[in-house]
Image (cartoon, rainbow, N blue to C red):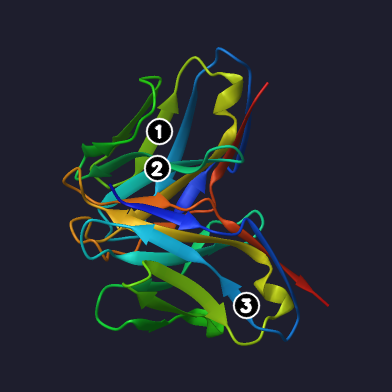
Amino acid sequence: AQSVTQLDSHVSVSEGTPVLLRCNYSSSYSPSLFWYVQHPNKGLQLLLKYTSAATLVKGINGFEAEFKKSETSFHLTKPSAHMSDAAEYFCVVSDGTSGTYKYIFGTGTRLKVLA
Amino acid sequence: KAGVTQTPRYLIKTRGQQVTLSCSPISGHRSVSWYQQTPGQGLQFLFEYFSETQRNKGNFPGRFSGRQFSNSRSEMNVSTLELGDSALYLCASSLAPDRPDTEAFFGQGTRLTVV
């Protein structure tokens, strides 16, 4: 079965410093992985997705993620945090074991950005 | 292009009642999925509809049901409400549910409170 594990439930960074949100996956085949962001009282917005075309994936708002098969990881990074990045972030794997695809979500990482 | 629209945004119901939530997908999208988000369980897949057919179902009791209309709009129904059904219910639409890299677009959700 497919699964993702987000290693940190909360991360705090100072504005202007790098962001690292960690995600490990478990998959019996080459996975499709996503990062979504959820701001308070808002729906989920796609940041980026990995679909085996390139291991380094660039997303919106300066975020990027690197797929590392040897480490089964798909960590999300951003060089410089902005106050508007404060939100909850979800790592997602697409699971097709039941014939059609559905999302399996990680437990989320709440990012706090300090002024 | 209008996004995914969920109505109502907020609901308060009493235990034992039933509730119907509505989701209008992005124009042209024929796949609609529903997810439940709670602090304890995170985001969990409820079911997916494509062309008026339920093609995938998560591990929820039969009190949770849904349907999809010919215009791709979807409704989900929860009968005999329990306190534990209090959650944010998110709807997502997508173009091609048979591809693992398909991006899902989420609505803002309906927050259901059961008292």
Q: Earlier in the sequence, mark 1 or mark 2?
A: 2
Q: Which amino acid lies under the numbered mark 3 shown in the image of this protein?
A: Val
Residue A19: numbered disc: 3
Residue B34: numbered disc: 2
Left or right? Give the position of B29 relative to A46: left
Is A70 or A74 nearer to us in this picture?
A70
Q: Residue at x 35, y 54 (%)?
A: B93
SS class, disc 3: strand
Q: Residue B79 at x, y = what percent? A: 45, 18
The answer to whether tags 3 and 1 share a subunit is no
Label 2 vs label 3: CA separation? 30 Å
Q: Which amino acid lies under the numbered mark 2 shown in the image of this protein?
A: Trp
Q: Residue A6 at x, y = what percent? A: 51, 58
The 10 Å Cα crowd at callout 3, few under 14, some 14 to 19, many 20 or more, is: many
Q: Residue B18 at x, y = what percent? A: 50, 19
**A53 vs B74: above or below:** below
Quadrant location, the N terminus of chain B: bottom left
Is A105 or B96 nearer to us in this picture?
A105
Cβ–Cβ under 8 Å for marks 3 and 1: no
Q: Which amino acid lies under the numbered mark 1 shown in the image of this protein?
A: Met
Residue B76: numbered disc: 1
Left or right? Give the position of B109 relative to B105: right
Is B2 or A23 nearer to us in this picture?
A23
Label 1 vs label 2: CA separation? 8 Å
Q: Residue at x 36, y 75 (%)?
A: A68
Q: Chain of mark 1?
A: B
Within the image, what quadrant is residue A11 found in?
bottom right
In front: label 2 or label 3 = 3
